[in-house]
Image (tube, grey):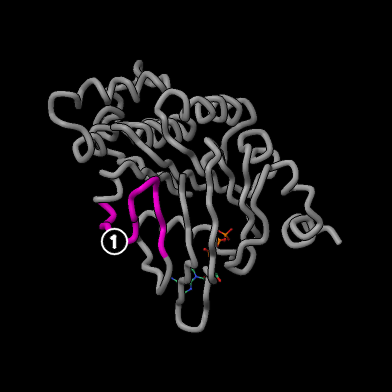
Amino acid sequence: MIKIDNLVVQFGGVKPINELSAVLTAPVGGLIGPNGAGKTTLLNVLSGFVKPVQGSVLLGEQALLAMTPLQRVQAGLRRSFQTEQVVEDLTVVGNIAAIADHVVGTRQRAGAVDQALAFVRLSTVADRLGQSLNLFQRRLVELAKCVVGQPKLILLDEPAAGLTEEEGKAFRELVLRIPAEFRAQVLVIDHDVDLIRSMCSETMVLDYGKLLALGPTASVLSDPNVRRAYLGEF
Ligand SMILES: Nc1ncnc2c1ncn2[C@@H]1O[C@H](COP(=O)(O)OP(=O)(O)OP(=O)(O)O)[C@@H](O)[C@H]1O
């Protein structure tokens, strides 16, 4: 469960997050909104890259905002970025181990990396360098980095961007298995409404940094306010 209470982020005169309160409970939830709505800023607040001027965020029972980014990773927070962050001169295993080093004890580390590799079905390319991977494999490495070492909340920022339809489907099926297999909650940001509809039982919509809608995805996507603000319907 993520509980956001009265969150405000201010950059000069702009408030990309403006008095946002929301409780997210779905195993796989969605976050949508027009360009500039504050979605990435919210992810940056959750992962510790942006400091809000007011408000609180709970991940389960843990207050996130007082923690450093590394402490949040150790508390179970994981994140993928719009531009994937695979290290080119590390192997696939090395990329995943770089996260495991911070979150898994030495004795369990190899097993945890193997589990993440097997989950994304990259065991056969475990020793290949990042630079030799195609986009789909890079996205899978990112996903493996997110599931390694007992994650609690995984934030995926446009995770399927650039993938073919078939790759996107395979990726989506993996993400849907995460809550049961890793007991982690997933929050997906994407502009692809079909992707959100097919993956997320609950969806939150931001508009100008404020909560426009939150609830079951089907009812949120048919809400006239959401259709007007986000889907461009009048
Ligand atoms: N570091 C910053 N300094 C000043 N303004 C910023 C900064 N980061 C974001 N903003 C502004 O905050 C607002 C929200 O931006 P944000 O990137 O969070 O939106 P978004 O919903 O993720 O948009 P997109 O869908 O285009 O990625 C925008 O008006 C943006 O210009």
Left or right? Give the position of 96 relative to 122: left
Left or right? Give the position of 108 relative to 191: left
Q: Secondary structure at mark 1?
A: loop
**Label 1: how many Cα within 10 Å (few below 14, some 14–19, many 20+):** few
Decide which of 3, 187 is in the foreground and name it.
3
Residue 9 falls within the magenta-colored stretch: no
At 40% from the left and 37% from the top, the residue drawn is: 142
Q: Residue furthest bottom?
A: 13
Decide which of 233, 71 is in the foreground and name it.
71
At 34% from the left and 55% from the top, the residue drawn is: 64
Q: Residue furthest front?
A: 61
Give the image location of residue 198, x and y in percent: 66, 33
Give the image location of residue 25, x and y in percent: 53, 42
From this view, report whether residue 135 is shown above or below residue 57: above
The residue under label 1 is 66
Q: Which portion, as a residue range, is magenta?
A: 56-70
Amino acid at the residue labelled 1: Ala
Residue 67 falls within the magenta-colored stretch: yes
Give the image location of residue 150, x and y in percent: 32, 32
Give the image location of residue 14, x and y in percent: 52, 78
Where residue 69 sits, quadrant-wise, is bottom left
